[in-house]
């Protein structure tokens, strides 16, 4: 794809990095991801591992290792035993030995290789209250994958009470759930620690509403490699919003939430 010439400095809050050094499924090798980000004019990107079974310690370390001397900022992916929507199943759930512990969260937080965390409750389960309390203590941003299996209301019930910065991926409406995206925008009125990223948001009216009503709470996320960064940037460029608000979404807001992206 051709390089974009949009004139903005862009940083990306939401990308996934292959951890095996090659391509498998939708993952791409670090070299290709770096090249595609450059084509889109993205100067830095937060990256985390893809979903997998059996824990994320090795995958997180691999992402941190592959981020060295590249325009990547490593986020550690976390898992847990709790069910994303069923309180009963959460009570009955048992922690497995590979599920993240509060001590591991502290180690990630104070390791200068990591600058935030990723939670995907549908794929990985929810950590227990001790882990969430530790996330609040370390106060690093957490990108949260929501969607139909973990709607915005459930995000508010389970995570926003802890007050660590939550970046709700895709406006909380993956896949293409416009009403859920609108409800996530509504949550910005009452939760100061909540932010929304633009990954996979295909509705221009939703993007424009979020940016115009909350210009300081929307962050650019490409969703790469599932979405080519060029496509993600172009979708945002088609929005009818003032240039200064576009700059905030592309750079100002992400760097304020994740200082390492600056």
Image (tube, rainbow, N blue to C red):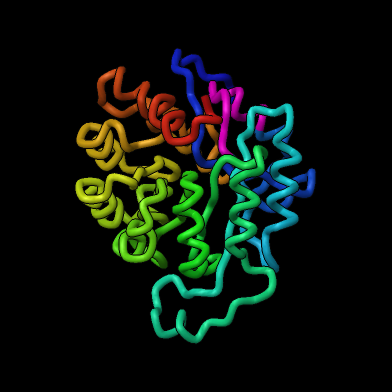
Q: Tell me if 120 is positioned left or right of 39 in this view.
A: left
- Can residue 79 be seen here? The reply is yes
Image quadrant holding the N terminus, namely top right
Question: Residue 202: x and y, percent?
Answer: 37, 43
Q: Is residue 260 above or below residue 54?
A: above
In-front residue for pair 195/105: 105
Q: In this view, does 86 lie above or below 7?
A: below
Extreme-right residue of the structure: 21
Q: Is residue 258 above or below residue 84?
A: above
Question: Residue 94: x and y, percent?
Answer: 57, 82
In-front residue for pair 85/33: 85
In-front residue for pair 201/81: 81
Per the rendered image, the range of residues in magenta is: 34-46
Number of numbered callouts drawn = 0
At x 63%, y 49%, the residue is 108
At x 63%, y 41%, the residue is 74
At x 42%, y 27%, the residue is 250
Q: Is residue 85 one of those drawn in magenta?
A: no
């Amino acid at each position: 794809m051709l390089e974009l010439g949009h004139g903005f400095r862009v940083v990306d809050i939401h990308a996934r990095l292959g951890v095996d050094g090659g391509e498998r499924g939708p993952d791409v090798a670090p070299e290709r991801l770096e090249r595609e980000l450059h084509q889109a004019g993205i100067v830095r990107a937060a990256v985390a591992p893809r979903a997998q079974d059996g824990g994320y310690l090795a995958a997180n370390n691999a992402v941190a290792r592959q981020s060295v001397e590249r325009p990547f900022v490593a986020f550690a992916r976390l898992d847990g035993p709790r069910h994303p929507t069923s309180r009963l199943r959460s009570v009955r759930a048992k922690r497995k030995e590979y599920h993240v512990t509060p001590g591991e969260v502290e180690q990630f937080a104070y390791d200068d290789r990591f600058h935030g965390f990723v939670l995907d409750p549908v794929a990985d389960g929810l950590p227990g209250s001790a882990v969430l309390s530790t996330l609040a203590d370390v106060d690093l941003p957490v990108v949260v994958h929501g969607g139909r299996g973990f709607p915005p209301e459930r995000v508010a019930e389970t995570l926003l009470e802890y007050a660590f910065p939550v970046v709700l991926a895709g406006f909380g409406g993956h896949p293409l759930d416009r009403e859920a995206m609108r409800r996530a925008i509504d949550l910005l009125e009452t939760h100061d620690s909540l932010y929304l990223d633009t990954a996979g948001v295909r509705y221009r009216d939703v993007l424009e509403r979020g940016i115009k009503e909350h210009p300081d709470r929307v962050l650019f996320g490409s969703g790469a490699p599932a979405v080519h960064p060029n496509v993600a940037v172009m979708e945002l460029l088609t929005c009818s919003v003032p240039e200064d608000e576009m700059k905030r979404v592309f750079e100002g807001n992400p760097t304020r939430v994740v200082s390492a992206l600056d």
